[in-house]
Image (cartoon, rainbow, N blue to C red):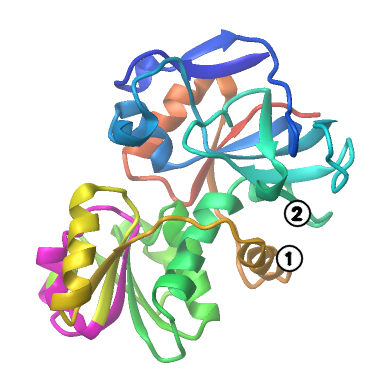
């Protein structure tokens, strides 16, 4: 099968388009023929070595963390699915979504409803569930809360705006002027153009800041939070872990880091609200598998409007 791997950490040029044997599903696993893989910032952060304290130094490593496709083989003991089922899945940080076939654990594999496309389904397991868990597991968003989404026009941001509105919050989105109409169309109540205004100059305003752009430091952003407010970071770092511990006990303004939990309830919530039309999935650009390096490079520009996806196969 064709797959994207890398044999050392570095830039997007380190990604290789290679032929390797098909993986084989073990007990409690399924083999999925991948239709679409979604591109997430965590994919290129792993490639750059930012998470090597988790991914290690054993190569090759496989790229990609979420996908949709069709089950082509069942591992021993699997009865929940059948061959031909349309599914999506999130993978561990060992990756493998940028490939023609991938093995996934059944507990991380979810059926796709008939009304949902493979493109949309490929974005749910990580980009969709991340803001939902931020707003329901880490900070209990309620009607009337003032939420700021830093990076409102990106893959996570476009989801976050809509999820926050469903939960009844007032939403301020930070993005460039060219994306103002997009985020307003998704339900944002106010837009801050980061080229004209720094949201950090607004003091004691927000109950929650979701840093989807990964550039809001706690020391600079905490003044924008109300007492009891929280900054939620998406990028994994030792510094954020330490700050999270310190603020838990010694500050009225908290910081937390997202670590996704495998929750079928959350995934079903996302499916229900997408199928009902309450949440729209924005797909910016589509790349072919052999162009995965270009897809990641585009993600790194920070200028994507919604999600970036890779079409792996058409059948």
- Specify whether residue 185 is in view: no
Region in magenta: 201-228
Percent across and percent down for residue 294 are 43, 25
The image's mark for residue 275 is 1
Q: State if disc 1 and disc 2 touch (CB < 8 Å).
A: yes
Q: Residue at x 66, y 61 (%)?
A: 264
- Is residue 116 found left or right of 161 in the rendered image? right
Q: Residue at x 49, y 25 (%)?
A: 292
Q: Secondary structure at mark 2?
A: loop
| Residue at the spot of label 2 | 116
Q: Nearer the viewer, residue 301 or 230?
A: 230
Percent across and percent down for residue 168 are 49, 86
- Is residue 86 found left or right of 236 in the rendered image? right
Q: Residue at x 31, y 50 (%)?
A: 235
- Specify whether residue 20 is in view: yes
**What number of labels is visible?**
2
- Is residue 20 found left or right of 132 in the rendered image? right
């Amino acid at each position: 099968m064709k797959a994207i791997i890398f044999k050392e950490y570095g830039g997007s040029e380190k990604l290789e388009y290679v032929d390797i044997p098909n993986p084989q599903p073990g007990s409690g696993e399924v083999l999925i023929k991948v239709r679409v893989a979604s591109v997430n910032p965590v994919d290129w952060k792993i490639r750059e070595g930012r998470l090597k304290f988790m991914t290690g130094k054993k190569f090759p490593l496989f790229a990609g963390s979420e996908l949709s496709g069709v089950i082509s083989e069942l591992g021993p003991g699997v009865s929940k699915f059948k061959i031909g089922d349309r599914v999506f899945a999130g993978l561990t940080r060992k990756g493998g979504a940028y490939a023609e076939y991938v093995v996934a654990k059944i507990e991380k594999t979810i059926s796709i409803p008939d009304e949902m496309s493979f493109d949309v389904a490929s974005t749910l397991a990580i980009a969709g569930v991340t803001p939902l868990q931020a707003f329901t597991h880490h900070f209990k968003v309620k009607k009337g809360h003032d939420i700021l989404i830093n990076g409102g026009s990106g893959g996570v941001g476009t989801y976050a705006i809509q999820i926050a509105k469903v939960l009844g919050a007032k939403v301020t989105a930070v993005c460039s002027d060219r994306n103002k109409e997009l985020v307003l169309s998704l339900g944002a109540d106010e837009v801050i153009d980061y080229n004209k205004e720094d949201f950090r100059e607004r003091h004691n305003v927000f109950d929650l800041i979701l840093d989807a752009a990964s550039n809001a430091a706690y020391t600079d952003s905490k003044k924008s939070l109300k007492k009891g407010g929280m900054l939620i970071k998406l990028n994994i770092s030792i510094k954020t872990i330490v700050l999270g511990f310190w603020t838990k006990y010694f500050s009225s303004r908290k910081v937390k880091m997202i670590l996704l939990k495998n929750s079928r309830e959350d995934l079903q919530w996302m499916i229900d609200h997408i199928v009902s039309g309450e949440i729209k999935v924005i797909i910016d650009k589509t790349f072919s598998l052999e162009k995965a390096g270009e897809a990641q490079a585009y993600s790194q520009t920070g200028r994507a409007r919604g999600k970036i996806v890779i079409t792996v196969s058409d059948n």
